[in-house]
Amino acid sequence: MDAIRAEKMGKKFRLRHCAGEAREKAWLRRLLQKESRGDFWALRDIDLAVRPGEVVGVIGPNGSGKTTLLSILAGTMVPSCGELKVNGTVSSLLELGAGFHPYLTGKENIYLNGSILGMSQAQIRRKYDWIVEFSGLGEFIESPLQAYSSGMAVRLGFSVAAAADPDVLIVDEVLAVGDESFQKKSSRQMRHFRDEGKTIVVVSHDLNLIRDFCRRVVYLRGGRVVCDGPAEDSVGHYIRDVHSGLLKGGAGLKVRHEWGTREAEIVSAELLNSRGEPAAQFLSPEDITVEVGFRAARELPDPVFGFAIHDAAHVLCFGSNTQLDGAGIPKISGAGRVRFRLKAPPLLTGSYLLSLSIHSGDHLTTYHRQEFCYPFAVVSSRRAEGIFSVPVEWEFGRETPKGEKP
Amino acid sequence: MLKRILELRRWGDLIRNMVLRNLRVRYKGSALGFLWTMLSPLFMMLIYFVFLRLLKIRIELPELLTGILAWSFFSTCLSDSVAAITANPSLIKRTAFPKLVFPVSMIAANLINFLLSLAVLVLFIAGYAVFTGYAVGAGWALLALPAVVGLNLLLLFGLCNFFSCLNVYFRDMEHLMGILLLSWFFLTPVMYPIEKVTESRSGELLLNLYCLNPMVPVVTLYRWVFLGKIPPLVAGFWVSIGITLLLALGGTAFFLKREPLFADEM
């Protein structure tokens, strides 16, 4: 039996026509006409089956229906059409510290918040010490919440939510709360839930986190499921859409393009044209020179500098590194520069994305990688299909029928 | 509907904690705290008493205080009810529990205040009787107190459910509530004894109509319980109790029908 099963599920909202419209007018209009013309489908035709113990990520641009989907799964909203069945108890981490009141002490808020999440008094009492311990609030637990920093309140909220022991967990952007050490703790807790076999549905804008945490990812766009499959596929599809400009004005979109230990860091990078001027557009087959400034926090032996060029659809066109090209660097420390020149790259007209990286010689540690961070355009006089240009010679001849004398 | 009301039992701990939150927040930081529950009706009684003397309306103090306590329970609940849902948008949108918890816990918090103030009322009546020789006709009627409180709660349950839900769709209710309560106040025998109405010569029909106000049975029954004053048992009085039951059912049905869409509207 599925933990969550949605069939042809949709959610319709009535649009408020303009922000300035007086409420009573809207109310009257609603009385007069049952079906308002300003209906808006936040979700449409959602088919989703989640098996028990499955961890599903939900991604998509703002306004794609992610939060609406979670709200429906969590039971705070009802779908306008279709079927939804959720088996088992659901706990939603849609909002941490729901119902927290600044006048109440941490302890009082734990009981209030816990019961809002559906825990019984006895359950909360059993978990109380664990919650206090996990939140790390110590004796602050007896002071009113208004004395807390916002980070402390959030930590308390997460701790209560983590103590609820549901079958299905609905999580919205709460994996990264509090300071760094608490973040580690909370993500460890989420992993613990995952390994315990809880069904988890999580929404986040942090694609790397989603990719790490979920094996399966659902990509929503305009209220519909665009892609539902392995994390790599859905995330890749989404990133491609973002970069191809399909998703216009992706405001608030946080595609984290960089990662790494930062033991060595790329501090600057510049693309130079054949005249040595910074440029973002190149006339094929002009030389492209890339100058990378880096800083190493400590002495690093045998570092490898690499780059990759992808097209707008994120197809890898070309990539190489100092190791492959036999330009080994014995060690780096402090600040420095690396420069490489792409000699007459035979690229066709289009937009491309340059990625840069510094990693260890054994490829085990990525010091810093900037994925798709440097877009550039190429204009080529050659008109052809594809990404790179290959000189072609055509020949034309007529087949001579056999037996006929030339 | 009954099923969904009974479902609340599963959320008993939540209601309890919401009531505690309500009471704690109300009295946090005030020096006299709970005492205000008792002090403010007493002050109000004195003010009304002086004012009514000037108007030459004769009413005994215990009668006045009974009316004031019943009325302030009613009016506090009603004015709190409009915000019961709309003041908690994040809880409505982001958490899943029966939303009836909001009006129910609000009424319950006010009920605790009310019951405590009734204890003060009993002391006051006793003291008043001793010092002035005021004849208290109460006795066995006190046993009916739970039933009268029950009737009062049914009325509040229906009305608060209705208004808390209505305000989600029609925010003007917040502002209308003050006017509604003011006119309701004058139609209810709080500042005047019910005899002002029963003994006026305006006729049987008008008395019956007057009694249709569901607060008339509530207030006069409280006076019966504590002071032994017989309520006006005319037809309108019984119809009014019937109306209370209908309001309880209707208001709750309205609330439950609309509840699934609250999150959409906030």
Image (spheres, coloured by chain):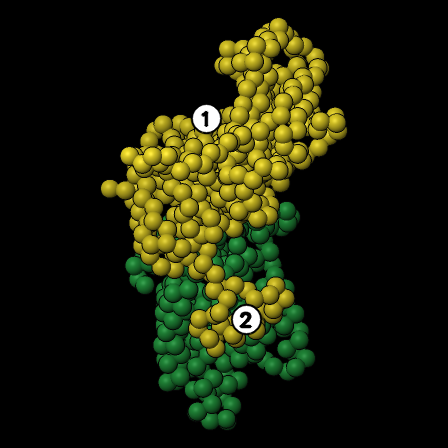
Chain colours: A yellow, B green
Above or below, A55 against A250 in this view is above
Residue B199 relative to residue A54: left or right = right
Label of residue A400 in the image: none
* Quarter of the N terminus of chain A within the rendering: top left
Q: Earlier in the sequence, mark 2 or mark 1?
A: 2
Residue A404 relative to residue B173: left or right = left
Q: A40 and B42: which one is in front?
A: A40
Q: Quadrant location of residue A294?
A: top right
Q: Quadrant location of residue B79?
A: bottom right
Rendered location of residue A50, percent (x, y): 32, 41
The answer, for residue A122, to whether it is visible in the render is: no
Residue A334 relative to residue B170: left or right = right
Q: Residue furthest front?
A: A405
Q: Residues within 10 Å of mark 1 (few under 14, many from 20)?
A: few
State the SS at label 1.
helix
The answer, for residue A340, to whether it is visible in the render is: yes
State the SS at label 2.
helix
The residue shown at (53%, 25%) is A318
Rendered location of residue A138, percent (x, y): 55, 27
Per the image, the residue denoted by label 2 is: A26
Rendered location of residue A121, percent (x, y): 40, 40
Per the image, the residue denoted by label 1 is: A188
Which amino acid, mark 1? Arg
* Quarter of the C terminus of chain A within the rendering: top left
The chain carrying label 2 is A
